[in-house]
Amino acid sequence: MQVLKQLLQWPQDIVFPVLDIVRLAVRNAEINSDLCSGIMGDQLIGHLQRFLVSHSLTANQMLSLRILCNMLSHPEGEALAIRHKDYLLSVVFDITPPFNKQMQIAISTLLLNLAVAFNRTRDSLSRARAVVASSVILPRLSDSEALFRGLVALGTLIWDADTLQDKTELIESVNSSKEIVTLLDKLSAGSSMDKVTQCAAQVSALMQV
């Protein structure tokens, strides 16, 4: 663990393989606990922040996002993400096109995993912010798998609202964005019955209170 932490301080142009190792390592429950608990967890977020700025190499951004996605697969990693939820949501807001397929999938997967975490912890305020993030990021996506995961994230957030009032407020938040409403209408009206079309139709139906 100490060696990994040291290697994360490598320069941007050669840190790629280190990030790839961490991406795989945090899927292991024991390593996830070691890397994501306490001070070491906060230090890990600090290291990733260095690679998630707009001028960072795309490969480093993508792998850092995938580390965050995998981090949420175990309790300690999820707890770390919840502690830094404001920063993680800002990452989703701030990453803008152009980005490749891998980046799109990483962003939408992070949003989906955060949605599940917010629902599990009954964090209604973060759920509302994640709905806004979904409304912002979905129109920026072009890859079908990324769109599907983003739609699942949005549907998950609305479906699991604690009360009818909460659900209504989340729906109103989505409807306030012309871009996301237009996108949902376009996707759900698709002629093919692929999973993106079906999911968009389900989300649209879910929004009918």
Image: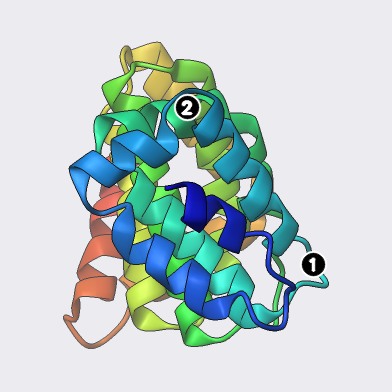
Identify which amino acid the numbered label 2 is placed on: Ile
Q: Residue at x 56, y 78 (%)?
A: 16
Q: Residues within 10 Å of mark 2 (few under 14, many from 20)?
A: some
Which image quarter is the C terminus in?
A: top left
Does any portion of residue 169 appear in the rendered image?
yes
Query: Where 155 falls versus 127 (above or below)?
Result: below
Which is more toward the observer, 99 or 61? 61
Give the residue at mark 2. 82
Q: Which label number is shown at residue 111? A: none
Specify the farthest residue to the right. Answer: 55
Q: Residue at x 59, y 42 (%)?
A: 45
> x, y percentage for residue 187?
38, 73
Query: Where 1 falls versus 34 (above or below)?
Result: below
Left or right: 128 in relation to 110 = right
Left or right: 31 in relation to 184 = left
The answer to which quarter of the image holds residue 208 is top left
